[in-house]
Image: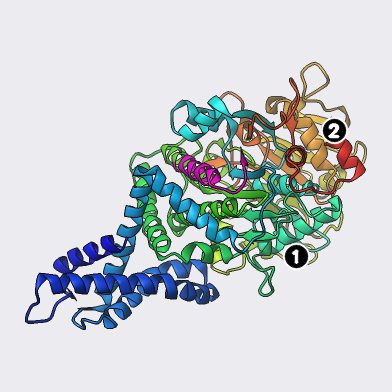
Amino acid sequence: MWAVSTVTMLVLAGLLPDFQLQSADGDSATRIAMTAALGAGAFGVLSAVVWPLLVRLLLLVPALVLGLLVFFLNGSLLLVALRINPSGQSEAAPETAVIVAAVMSAVASATGGALAVRDDDAYRRRLSRLAIRRRRSRPPCAATPGTVFLQLDGVGHDVLTAAVAKGLMPTVAGWLDATHRLTPWRTDWSSQTGASQLGILHGSNFDVPAFRWYEKEHREVMVCNRPTSAAELQRRAIGRTADGGLLTLDGASRGNLFSGGADEQALVLSIATRRRGRENRSRAGYFAYFADPANAVRTALSFFAEVAREIGQSTAARLRRQRPRVGRGGLYPFVRAFATVVERDVVVAAVMGDLLVGRSAVYADLVAYDEVAHHSGPHSRDAEKVLQRLDRALALIEKAAEHAPRQYRIVVLSDHGQSPGETFRTRYGLTLGDLVRAGCGLPVPRRAEHTHSGTEARAAVRAALRRPVEEGGEKHRPTRHSEPVVLASGNLGLISFPDVPHRMTKEELDARHPALLTTLANHPGVGFLLVRSEEHGGVVLGAYGAEIPLGRLDGAAGHGPAGPLAVFGAGAADAVRRTHSFPHTADIMVNSWYDPESGEVLAFEEQIGSHGGLGGAQGRPFLLSPVCVSAPVGTGEELVGAEAVHRVLRRWLREADGPQVPLSAEGERAA
């Protein structure tokens, strides 16, 4: 790499007028080459010694600001290297030093990557050296197999199989042909990362009715991707299960909403609000990655390239008058670049580091596809490109596992899928909140307001910037007689009346707002409603006066009335009944219209690929597991719910004599 840096410096000295490696009256070629070699060597030493210290100090600033400072810090180091050069003849303008340092780091990184790709032995030696350095600070690992769980956020079962069939994911295709099995599973009614990942990592997602919901006793909105809410949800789950989570013993949690009980955590949202103490290690993942200046420059360049790519793709979609389409301006290009480049690179590097030191269990979330599919569509070409890059990330992790001190089983899974379709607002010209106001006899604004699109990537960006995750209505502290709180979670809507301390009944709602339930149930964009009934305990309401008590509701053909849930398929009735039992279920739960032929839903948020409720691919994620572990479910059985997935993953850890999570007697029987 030193020789490559020397050549790069010589080339740049010939191209840039403000960058000189010789005196004004000229020097011999040998002296110029010696000056370049000494300068490149000094720059390399400073990068290796000083850069990690600078990055550690800069952890005091937001992570994204650190990314922007990468170029300036690199340029400063080059200026210092030129000043201490023994020849005393090299100099560069500050702005030129930034360019030279960036190019030198990028070329060195690219050359190293190219050599690794072309020479397997070189790549193997590099990984082996890295593994030896990382293992020096840890005791020898167990001889039993370790397990790495890689979550491809938002990638549905059908999307994965289609991508494999198209040749977009050769790594996954190779696994399916030789070492792995693919199993679909069914989410709960709340088909979103908060509910699914809480259930998968902590064994309970009870009382998580949606991505966001209003809690009357606390008079605030809970949001799964808000750090304070994530910490509280994790605390509640641990209290219900009486154990720390899937990763309690020698585990690592990377890029997740929740910790899973892991001792090693990086980019975990539930600890992002902690300011001090050894346990506040969420942002340590940035240091571990950006401590290498080549990583920093490569990721920064890829970040801005992704911003440009998104601007080009969104402009092309607008010029083609593509439908459906949502706005992709403002800060979204930067949010997308953060999800598809920064977070991916940092999380993958952290996982590779965990494998090389031999941790027993690792769980990591890669959110890139979910973020892009929300705005471009789950079957779009933009989303397919992201799947290709995710497959390459899986290949890197597989390669790192070959050089780990123990054997690893790689499990890939998703937390939910996504269902396509235009937004409720686009189709009808009003939001769900406008419809509720109309049904309550309240004035409706002439111009409907956009609803916030809360995603994991957006929350990660805010955490990296150290900004609280708050969204307009989520700061709501209602007073008596305040208006209804209307919240959206994909194609699931929640309506709460904050001045009533309990969950209102159908009878109370009819007495207070006689037209509300009828207005909602008969709207063509609404599939069904769930409300509590004084007489029946809970009822599902649909168009044309359909009203079916939950006790008599069954979505299976020939086993009772399905009513408005008929189009949502098997399991819908059980999912609705479970949510009805939650203490914080909203006064009115609204699931959007669903077309079983096209698989489309109508999102109450500004998303053309959405998830959060019932309907289509959003409720059908996947579990890709090695054939060397027991089958997730028996022949003819279906894997239903995130808590069931948790029990399967714990069983696999026990089979490998890995981290043993204490189970209650009831939990043992269930597993």
Which stretch did the figure color magenta? 389-411
The answer to whether residue 117 is left or right of residue 58 is: left
Residue drawn at (91%, 36%) of the image: 536
Residue 670 on image: x %, y %: 85, 36
Split into 4 quadrants, where in the image is the N terminus?
Answer: bottom left
Magenta stretch encompasses residue 308: no
Q: Residues within 10 Å of mark 2 (few under 14, many from 20)?
A: many
- Dividing the picture into quadrants, the one containing residue 121 is top left
The answer to the question of whether label 2 and label 1 lie on touching residues, with beta carbons closer than 8 A, is no
Residue 76 on image: x %, y %: 34, 77
Q: Which residue is most to the left?
A: 25
Q: Residues within 10 Å of mark 1 (few under 14, many from 20)?
A: some
Magenta stretch encompasses residue 398: yes
Whole-angstrom CA distance, mark 2 to mark 1, is 31 Å
Residue 35 on image: x %, y %: 20, 74
Name which residue type carries label 1: Pro
Of label 2 and label 1, which has the lower sequence position? 1
The answer to whether residue 425 is left or right of residue 13 is: right
Residue 550's tag is: 2
In the rendered image, which residue does mark 1 sit on? 478
Give the camera-side residue of 616 and 271: 271
Residue 435 seen in the current view: yes
The answer to whether residue 227 is left or right of residue 553 is: left
The kind of secondary structure the magenta stretch mainly shows is helix
The answer to whether residue 185 is left or right of residue 555 is: left
Q: Helix, strand or loop at disc 2? A: helix
Q: Nearer the viewer, mark 2 or mark 1?
A: 2
Give the camera-side residue of 645 and 438: 645
